[in-house]
Image (cartoon, rainbow, N blue to C red):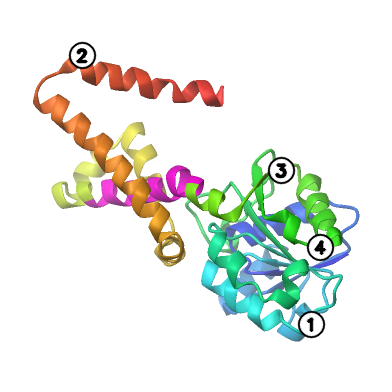
Amino acid sequence: MKIGIVGLGLMGGSLALSLRKLSFVTHIYGLDHNGRHQQQALDLGLVEAFIDFETLCTMDVIILAIPVNGVIESLKALEGKISETTTVIDLGSTKEVIVKAVPPSIRKNFVAAHPMTGTEHNGPSAAFDGLYNDKVVVLCDLEESGTHQQEVAVRIFSGIHMRLSYMHAHEHDRHAAFISHMPHVVSYSIANAVLTQEDKYNILAMAAGGFRSMSRLAKSSPHMWEDIFRQNRSNLLDAIETFQAELEEFKKEIKNEDWEKVREKMHRANKLEEIFS
């Protein structure tokens, strides 16, 4: 099986490292318009070579590990250029806009996937083997994909030891807004709030585990996350408003020194850990 990966950053590069271990994968090629990324990916051995778009269309599997707008543009460009057995998988963080944009003629070729993993780092140098191990991958509207393409996607993600979950694209985007996209907004906001009040020396001197954990996501790529926020705007606004209401309640109870209610809220929040244990 020949695989072409478009985008050799954290997600695409790490996937390449995982795919190399699969016996049914014979070749892994890359396509990335960033010349520096190409050289880094080759130096790190993420792919064996870089190919052009025409050669990409001959691959058995095409993986789109690029921002959402790039995924949509790529899907349109692939129309009429791939065979009926080609499998195209995207790794985008939003799904409904992408699914709706797939040209009907290649809908059977397409599998909408979102691996629930990542770090705040980006670029080929951020890639590492094991990023996908034991993580969840959400496959959206899989019944609309061809039988062959479904089997290929399941074989790939199972092969790299991911846990498969299935849901509709609109359902995925709603959940992602709360558990992924809104936390990034909060992290960016925390970082900016601190930067308006503290100088960098105080931050370095006093920032401990709590602040570092909360601000970690603020290191994430603004280019990538602007794209995600734009595509999932409606769900993200709902999530932000829900969070704001909760924060206002905390603010009111602290202002009124209603420590019993504050304590109740914290105890209720503690129950989240029970879900993960």
Residue 6 location, quadrant: bottom right
Q: SS class of the residue under badge 2?
A: helix
25 falls in the magenta region:
no
Q: Which residue is mark 1?
A: 55
Res. 76 mark:
none
> In the rendered structure, which disc, 2 or 3, sits on the residue that comes first in sequence?
3
How busy is the neighbourhood of tag 1: few (under 14 within 10 Å), some, or many (20 plus)?
few
> In the rendered structure, which disc, 1 or 3, sits on the residue that comes first in sequence?
1
Task: Please tell me whether residue 34 is drawn above or below residue 271 in the rendered image.
Answer: below
> In the rendered structure, which disc, 4 or 1, sits on the residue that comes first in sequence?
1
Measure the C-alpha gap from mark 4 to mark 3.
18 Å
> In the rendered structure, which disc, 4 or 2, sits on the residue that comes first in sequence?
4
Q: Where in the figure is residue 67, as x and y percent of width and height? A: 53, 67
Measure the C-alpha gap from mark 4 to mark 2.
56 Å
In the rendered view, does 197 fall on the left or right side of 167?
Answer: left
Q: Which residue is mark 2?
A: 260
What kind of residue is marked 2?
Glu
